[in-house]
Image (cartoon, helix red, strand yellow):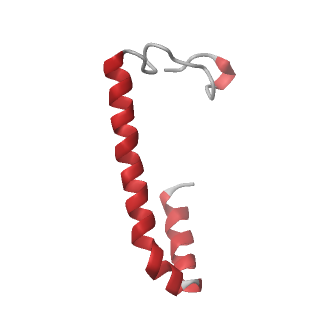
């Protein structure tokens, strides 16, 4: 889903469910931002401890199951 799809979906949701949108839009956005921050901290801990994807990579999700990292 690209940013244009997200914009269209959010404007559609804000029009159809305006009261719910007003109540939850900032909470959902803050949750997304907090999740990104926590993911960054976990990634930093893995990198410092030496168990990051650079050390123990996987080919799951890579085309042809060939390691792409």
Q: Is residue 38 left or right of residue 19?
A: left
Residue 64, by quadrant, is top right
Position of residue 66 relative to residue 3, above or below, is above
Position of residue 7 relative to residue 22, above or below, is above
Residue visible at 37% across and 43% down in the picture: 38
Taking depth in this image into account, of 1 and 46 the one nearest to the observer is: 46
Taking depth in this image into account, of 67 and 58 the one nearest to the observer is: 58
Q: Which residue sits furthest right?
A: 64
Residue visible at 49% across and 14% down in the picture: 56
Image position, residue 54 (x, y; %): 43, 17
Residue visible at 33% across and 29% down in the picture: 44
Q: Is residue 30 left or right of residue 5?
A: left
Residue visible at 33% across and 36% down in the picture: 41
Image position, residue 13 (x, y; %): 56, 77
Taking depth in this image into account, of 15 and 41 the one nearest to the observer is: 41
Q: Image quadrant for the N terminus?
A: bottom right
Image position, residue 43 (x, y; %): 38, 31
Taking depth in this image into account, of 14 and 22 the one nearest to the observer is: 22
Q: Is residue 35 left or right of residue 8?
A: left
């Amino acid at each position: 889903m690209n940013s244009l799809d997200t914009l269209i979906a959010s404007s559609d949701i804000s029009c159809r469910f305006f009261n719910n949108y007003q109540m939850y839009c900032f909470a959902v956005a803050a949750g997304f931002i907090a999740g990104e921050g926590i993911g960054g901290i976990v990634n930093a801990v893995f990198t410092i401890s030496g168990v990051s994807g650079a050390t123990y990579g996987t080919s799951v999700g890579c085309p042809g199951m060939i390691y792409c990292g």
